[in-house]
Every structure is written in C-alpha cells, then in structure tokens.
Amino acid sequence: MPITEKDVEKIAILANLELTPEEKQAFTSQLSAIVSHIDKLNELDTTSIEPMSHCTVAQSGPGYAERDDTVLPCLGQQAALKNAPDAERGYFKVPKVIG
Amino acid sequence: MDISNLTIDELHDLYKRRQVTVSEVTKSSLEKAEKLNPQLNAFLAMNSTAAMERAADIDAELSSGKELNALTGIPVALKDNICTLDLRTTAGSKILGNYKPVYNATVVERLNAAGAIIIGKTNCDEFAMGSSNENSAFGPVRNPWNIDYVPGGSSGGSAVAVAAGIAPIAFGSDTGGSIRQPAALSGIVGLKPTYGRVSRYGLIAFGSSLDQIGPFSRSVRDTARALGVIAGRDRCDSTSSDFSVPDYLKALNGQVEGLRIGVAPEFFAAGIDSEVKASVEAAIQKLVEMGAKTVDISLPHTEYAVAVYYIIATAEASSNLARYDGVRYGFRAEDATTLSNMYRQTRELGFGTEVKRRIMLGTYALSSGYYDAYYKKAQQVRALIEADFRHAFEKCDIIATPTSPTPAFRIGEKSDDPLAMYLSDIYTITVNLAGVPGISVPCGVSKTGLPIGLQLIARHFDESTLLNAAHAYQQAAPLTEKPVISQ
C-alpha cells in the first residue's frame, strides 16, 4: 500500500516533526519503497504464532529476573535540572502550554 | 611508546615488570588519538585531563604493591551513546550536542572499578542508526585501511579507535549489527553479547529489545576479558539477566575438536561478494582442519529479517526518541511561541534525516489502523526467526556466516538509497532479533586492501563456546596485514 503525502503529514504530526516540503516529498517516496519491501511479510501465515514481545531470559526461565522493590537514593532535583535549557525556582521553564 | 600492537596481557606484563608506566601508555594513546583525528574523525570528545589523573593515581597504587585488576591501566574508548558522568555525550546528534550526563552508565562504573582508563568518546551514526557512520551530525568516520571508505556503523568511531592502534579496547552498541559489521569492515574483533548479558542502563536507547553494549579489540582474549568485566545482572536494567557470568578467559582452550559448525545456504546466496564468500568458506575450512565439523542447517526466515527489523527497531526508536523535546536537556529551538511549536521545531532542527526517517516509519507502524498489519505481524515473524535458531542449535553448536555481504564501500556510495543500505544488514540482523550472541573475527583482506569478517553465532548465554571458537580460529589464522593508517 503506497504512502501518500497526506499520510506523511499525519505521521509527522504524531511524531512531533515539522517537516520541510522537500522532506515531505522525499519521505513519501522513500517510505513507500520501504513499506513495499515490508509487505513481503504477508507471504507468511502467522495465524497461530504468539507475538514475541521480548527476548529476555532469566536463570529461572523466559521473562524478567526479579528483585526486591526497595527504594534507593536517586538523582535529586539539582542534578535533574543541570542540563535544562531554561530553569527557574526548581522547575523546567517552557513556552506557554496553551495557545 | 607505541602500544598499537600490544594486547592487554602484554601491557599488564610490562606494568608488572615496571618497564613502562600507566601514565606513559595513557599519554601515548591520547596523543595518537589527537594526531589521527583530523584524518579519521573517530573521536568526538577527549577525556585527557581526567585520564592522566587516573593514570597517575594507578601508577602510585601499583608502586605501593597493589595488584592489577582485569583492566588496570588499559586505555579504553567509548561510543558516544554511552553516558559518562560530566563528559559530553551526544549520541552523534545535534539534539544532544551540549549534553553532559549526570550519571555513569553501569558499564562505565564497572570499567572504572576494573581500573580502565577512559580516553574519550567516539563518533557514531546518530542515535546508532546507520551502517556506515555517515549519519553522524559531526561528520563521517574514515576507515584506516583506506580513508575514502567507510569503517562501518553505527559504532564506526570505536572500531577505528582499535583498528588504528589508538586503544586496545573500545566499546560500542549493537542493535542490528552495529558492533559486528564495523569490526568486519575495519579488520578487528567485535562481539555482541546475548541480549540481557550486559546492562543497558546508561546506553542511550535506540531499540530496547535489541540493543546490547559490546567490546571491540584486536584479540579474542582481550574481548573475553572485557566481557567478563561488563557482564552480569544490574538492578537498574530490568532486562538484564541473572544468568551467572562464567570465567570467559578460562573457557579459551583453543580446542574445537568435535565442534559442530552450522552452515546455512541463506547466508551464501545472491548479493554476496565473491571474495567475501571465498574468504569465509576458507575460514570455515580452517576450523574443520582443526577438528570441527560442518553441519547443513537452514534459517529459512532470514529473507524476512530486514522487514521485521525495520518495523520493530523503528517502532521502538519512535518511542525512545520521543523524550528529545527540548524540555529537560539538550538542544531547544529558540523563538518557539508555544510548547507544541517548541517540540516540533526542536526535533526538526535537532534530528538528522536518517533519524527522522526512522521515527516516521516507526510511528506509522504503530499508528492506529496499521499496528496489527505491521508491528504485531513483525513480532510474530520475529518469533519464527527465533525458532529458526532454536531448531538449528539442536544440530550444531555454532553457526558460521559472513558478517557483511561486501567489504567496506566508498563514503557516499550508498547514501542515496536507504533501502539498499538497510538490505546490507541482512547477515547481522537476525542475531539481534533472536537475542543470541554473535562475534565478527577478521578472516581475510580483499584484493583492494579491505578487511573481510567471519561471523560466528552461538546459543543464548553460550559466549564461552563462541569466544573459544573465535579464539581458536584467530590463533590459527591471525590477520597479518595492517591498515594504511595505524602508526
């Protein structure tokens, strides 16, 4: 199923990317070609196959190893704000949220 | 003091005999990195002051009789997607161009505890997305075997740091081949451990069900030693396994008598360069001469691997990269008047083209109406690929394949066709999808002077068998050629 420029615009909104017209054009043809290749998966009958959501194996068997839910010291506010482009009184400062 | 050809054992021997100091070795490594960087562009940041301070401390400890740890006094380079406290970490991206982590990755903590000296951060494809190191926001890395050629990617900088003799060990990450493929193209050893063998805490995430950190070296013995330092359960990474860590060095006995090597036709089919095919077949034959035997196997779903990978990896990436929004760290677009404009402009200006392309693809695959057709389908085929390996390992102990269908290609040669670039990952990708460990070891040099790699693959958590087979092969057929740039 080919991807249209309209599709690209919708996906860009979901992905929070403000694409240029050139990018929209290029991505439309490139993504179409890639998705065409991906359609190959339809050759396979996977009706009874359980989707593989992770490949973690613990000593005790498939799935995650467990640990006790204990609280340890973590980053702290000062460290967390260290790389902030704009911060004030312990908050991350951003442009207005609504509007 | 030229350390280009010394292994860790040799360096430790020199330290024990007081024939050289850690400070001399570290200085030599730092100077070489800086001298070669204009040509190779392997490093994005040097850690010179801290490295020399550490070296001085270690020299003092050694003088007062302290024992050597696994990596004491060994210069080490780290891919720039591994967080280092207070040392700039960019993941090869403008969006993290000024980011200084406030914590160390677990791997870094373990390396420090083992006495390693971090000399700098290496260049890589942006957010580890690429197979040539041409997608870095800070310029491509060049192959020391021929500077007009790519070193491979995404961990190109780390591969070059080792290939050019700057450091004996470097670390990269591998999501679809990003350690093994640059190892092959740069003529060195590169290991991707079993998924969950090494903590991902502090590794800037690309594909969380695929990523693993692993070592580059010139010698499998050094690889085994490095793995022993970084492997093991980490409470900060819920996907890290509690499988015990064996003594990988002890496992290197060089014996391959009776080892069953699986050979699958899917890895020797159309598209493979004839010199690569001949070189890898000769390498397998060498192991047979040493007592191993080949077994015919099939990994029938290999042809679907690129499709599966480019849904799963991009879907996971679209989620993992959502955090780069200009709020808490990294680049923020100026003059945005609202929060949503700030998000969109920050990401548009901060991300490179390949990253945007993959975020778009992943977002599409996960979006309403397409999730079942793409993401769920890909997960089902992933289960089939994992089953292929399980069945194969009933008949063999390791699988031997070429690492890459071709040797290194020219810078710029494949950058216009993303799909062609993706298809060149065909031999490495299934290993990440199944979660099994894989290693690339040099097995030859092409007529045009470019290295060729042999890939070996083993069962989950069977790095001992994998490393031993690679070690045995390397002892029997060491690479004698050297890159043009290494002195």
Image (tube, coloured by chain):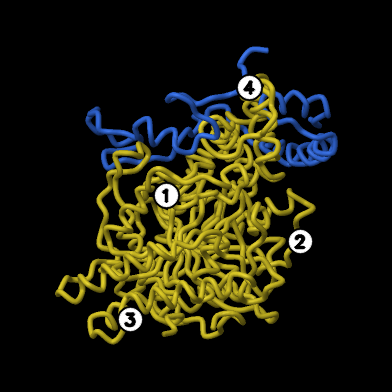
Chain colours: A blue, B yellow
Q: Earlier in the sequence, mark 2 or mark 3?
A: 3
Tell me if mark 3 has few (under 14), some (14-19) or many (20+) residues whose alpha carbon lies within 10 angstroms of its own. few
Type of amino acid under label 1: Asp
- The one nearer the camera, B236 or B23, is B23
Dots 1, 4 in contact, CB < 8 A? no
Distance, label 3 to label 1, CA atoms, is: 32 Å
Frontmost of labels 3 and 4 is 4
Q: Position of residue B23 (x, y in %)?
A: 34, 75
Frontmost of labels 3 and 1 is 1
Disc number at residue B10? 3
Distance, label 2 to label 1, CA atoms, is: 34 Å
Type of amino acid under label 2: Gly
Q: Earlier in the sequence, mark 3 or mark 4?
A: 3
Dots 2, 4 in contact, CB < 8 A? no
* Residue A91 position (above or below residue B301): above
Disc number at residue B339? 4
Residue B327 quadrant = top right
Circle 1 sits on which residue? B86
Type of amino acid under label 3: Glu
Task: Tell me what residue is drawn at x 31 percent, y 40 percent.
Answer: A58
